[in-house]
Amino acid sequence: MKNITIAIDGFSSTGKSTIAKLIAQKYNYVYVDTGAMYRAVTLFAMQHNLVSSDFLNEHELIEALKNIELTFIFNADLGFAEMFLNGKNVEKEIRTLEVSKLVSKIATISEVRKKLVLEQKGFGVKGAVVMDGRDIGTVVFPNAELKLFMTASAEKRATRRYKELIDRGDNVSFEDILFNVQERDRIDSTREDSPLLKADDAIEFDNSDMGITEQFERICSLVDQKIGV
């Protein structure tokens, strides 16, 4: 069996990370959550008062990029790697609605994208990697052997995200979540640098009415074909 690169792109809250983790675990592949990387840079910007809902100090953030070290460290208890920002575990902090509201703004900065894309490309040198994000199949790994594009209705995605945040104890409203999902769609799809696009050779998955088990089984079948099982 050969090692391949699996690129999973798509809209926010379509379950890209969930399915990518499952695929990585099954095939013993490296999983890279690129969204966590952008969220970590966003958290850094928030911590240093470089971004808010109506403010962005792009120049100072670009200057500070050299001081941002992002690391994935595997957590055996969880079964996946967690995001560390400058040596600190920030996995929980980067999943808040506050970060979600600002991450697309940070992701539009070309210098941020260049830094993270360069790091992301390094993860895929040897193959055997599953990476999810917005531009994996179009920019990071245009030659990936398997490309998937995940989509679902905004309402379905907002419902999933709302339940996830409520279950972990966050005080959020469904209306805020829905607005955030729709706004992120708009920004991600219209930014000049690496907008969210479906690669020509990507397989589209509309999982509005598809459970994780069905998605997992269908995608595993595609992976098996590619690796020669």
Image (cartoon, grey):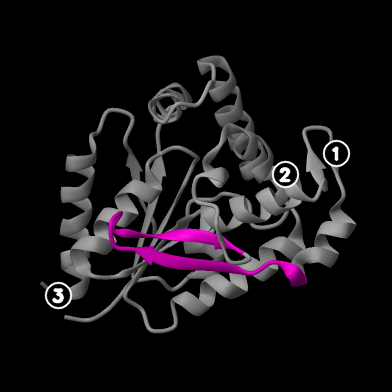
Dividing the image into 4 quarters, which one contains the C terminus? bottom left
Amino acid tagged 2: Lys
Q: CA distance from mark 2 to mark 1?
A: 10 Å
* Residue 190 position in % (x across, y down): 68, 43
- Splitting the image into 4 quarters, where does residue 24 fall? bottom left
- The residue at 60%/38% (across/down) is 100
The residue positioned farthest toward the bottom in the image shown: 126
220 horizontally vs 178: left or right: left
Asked whether disc 3 touches disc 2, contact meaning CB atoms under 8 Å apart, the reply is no
Q: CA distance from mark 3 to mark 2?
A: 41 Å
* Residue 121 position in % (x across, y down): 52, 75
* Residue 153 position in % (x across, y down): 43, 27
Q: Determine the secondary structure under disc 1.
A: strand
Q: Main secondary structure of the magenta part?
A: strand
Mark with earlier residue (3, 1): 1
Q: Is residue 20 magenta?
A: no
- The residue at 40%/70% (across/down) is 144
Residue 194 or residue 55, whichever sits in front: 55
Q: Determine the secondary structure under disc 3.
A: loop
Q: Which residue is mark 2?
A: 105
State the extent of the magenta-drawn residues as a range: 66-85
Amino acid tagged 1: Phe
Q: Determine the secondary structure under disc 2.
A: helix
Q: Which residue is mark 3?
A: 228
